[in-house]
Amino acid sequence: MNELFIEPELTTDAKNPQNASYVRKTFQIQKEIKNAAVKFSACGMYKAFVNGAEVDTQVFLPGRTSYGYRLQYQEYDVTKMLRAGENAIVTDRSWKAFQNGPVRRNNVKQGELYDARKELQGWTDIGFDDSRWHGVKKSSYPGQLVPGEGERITEHERFQPEKILHTPDGSTVLDFGQNLAGYVEFRVKGKAGTKVELVCGETLDENGNFTLENLGFRKDKHTGCYPQTIQYILTEGTQRYKPLFSVQAFLQERALGFYH
């Protein structure tokens, strides 16, 4: 495979959370394409699109490994997704990158901060104006590339809260009634700039308030948030959201703390 990795960030600070990177590339097809395949990977997690369509229903790709030593990749047949003229894929250093999109912070365990006011409408398709995006550089990734291993990770079941509790400290707790690992999808309507915060955990304390103390969790010094926290900043109107790159553990009876 073409082992040209690109680095989209202009600067990297491993100690502090970073905005997610968005990368795109367009190219021309002048002749009929009989077969076309594309390989995707990332030192982290990714979602991949070709001409505006997501290439896979799997989540949390490319799969967890020790990224410094070994990195999985996924290969897809995209023949039917291409068209004559301009298309959006192909990796080289002419890609463009952007870090000022809606995913402001994300971590598979810590949570996600999503600002809907910064959504990039149409960024995965042709015709998008990327004149404000910057270039990328060739990566010096030292690890080994291997084909994707293990089972496909996809959404399987949906659960509705069984109880809604109002705690003494004014919080609202949604109880899903069973152990599970997943993420919460919700629909919300409100004024642009309003923040919705969901803290995911497993129990109430002796006073009947939602707590993460039993897990030993403390607020992160950089983000000011507890682990397993989802923050969503509204744009105007009705909108639907679920985390892109974070999964939470709802371990016992009390499944979700909801703050606003």
Image (tube, rainbow, N blue to C red):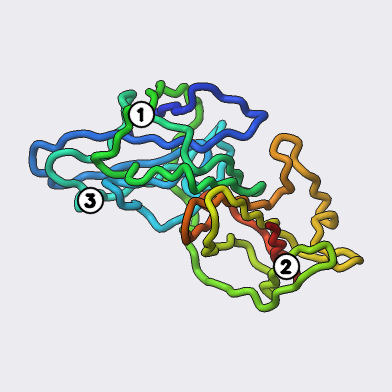
Vertical order, 236 against 1 (above or below): below
Name the quadrant containing residue 88.
top left
Q: Look at label 2 and name its amino acid.
A: Val
Q: Which residue is mark 1?
A: 96
Near mark 2 (Cα within 10 A), the count class, few <14, some 14-19 or many ≥20, is many
Near mark 1 (Cα within 10 A), the count class, few <14, some 14-19 or many ≥20, is many
Q: Residue furthest bottom?
A: 162
Q: Look at label 1 and name its amino acid.
A: Lys
Q: Which residue is mark 2?
A: 173
Helix, strand or loop for disc 1:
strand
Residue 239 locus on image (x, y percent): 47, 59
Nearest to N terminus: mark 1 or mark 2: 1
Query: Residue, x 61% and y 44% (percent of image)?
Result: 107
- Would residue 94 appear left or right of 30 to someone viewing this image? right
Residue 78 locus on image (x, y percent): 25, 49
In which quadrant of the rendered image does the N terminus lie? top left
* Real-space Cα separation, disc 3 to disc 1, in angstroms: 21 Å
Q: Residue furthest front?
A: 191
Of 50 and 222, nearer the camera is 222
* Real-space Cα separation, disc 3 to disc 2, in angstroms: 43 Å
Query: Residue, x 70% and y 74% (percent of image)?
Result: 164
Q: Which residue is mark 3?
A: 81
Residue 64 locus on image (x, y percent): 55, 46
